[in-house]
Image: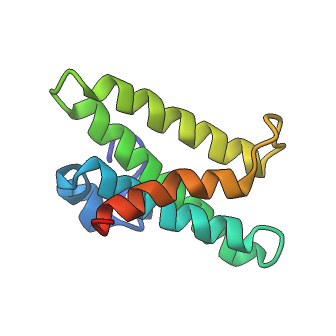
Amino acid sequence: MDKIMGMENCQHKSLAEGGWAKMPFYLQMGNLGSEVSRALKWFGKNEKRFQVSFERALELFDLTIEAAQDAESGCRGGRLKEVCRAREEFCDYFYGNSWGTNPVKIMRYYDQFAMLGRGL
């Protein structure tokens, strides 16, 4: 976490100190989806709540990217690319939406991880 952002501003300190990297990828993405959902919910309705959710989601994206970079498994390269692309799409939606991203489709993506985490 220190590589990406300062610990003094970290909202998920226990996760940044190694807890996040120990979680399975599908749980990371399911939890990340919760923050993405909150950001989508508050966008255009409550700027303060939106900003907090947006920043927390970016922090979880960065933790997930860092975990994928640090992983020794050869299969993690695809995950790294996937998470980086998801982060890029998340940011684009709120700042220009040049890709025409649909928020319903964004949530369908994360819902798959949430269902996997619940064993559905």
**Residue that appears at 55% across and 33% down:** 85
17, 36: nearer the viewer: 36
23, 105: nearer the viewer: 105
Q: Quadrant of residue 118?
A: bottom left
In the picture, measured across the screen, residue 117 lies left or right of residue 108, that is left
**Residue that appears at 64% across and 47% down:** 90
- Please state, as top left, top right, bottom left or bottom right, where the C terminus lies in the image: bottom left
Position in image of residue 87 (x %, y %): 56, 42
**Residue that appears at 29% across and 48% down:** 25
48, 73: nearer the viewer: 73
In the picture, measured across the screen, residue 26 lies left or right of residue 85, that is left
Snapshot colouring: rainbow
**Residue that appears at 33% across and 59% down:** 116
Q: Quadrant of residue 69?
A: top left
Name above or below for residue 27 compared with residue 48. above
Position in image of residue 97 (x %, y %): 81, 42
Position in image of residue 24 (x %, y %): 23, 51
- Count how many numbered circles sit on residues in the image: 0
Name above or below for residue 93 compared with residue 76. below
Name above or below for residue 85 compared with residue 40. above
110, 59: nearer the viewer: 110
The residue most toward the front is: 120
In the picture, measured across the screen, residue 54 lies left or right of residue 97, that is left
In the picture, measured across the screen, residue 81 lies left or right of residue 64, that is right
Position in image of residue 62 (x %, y %): 43, 45
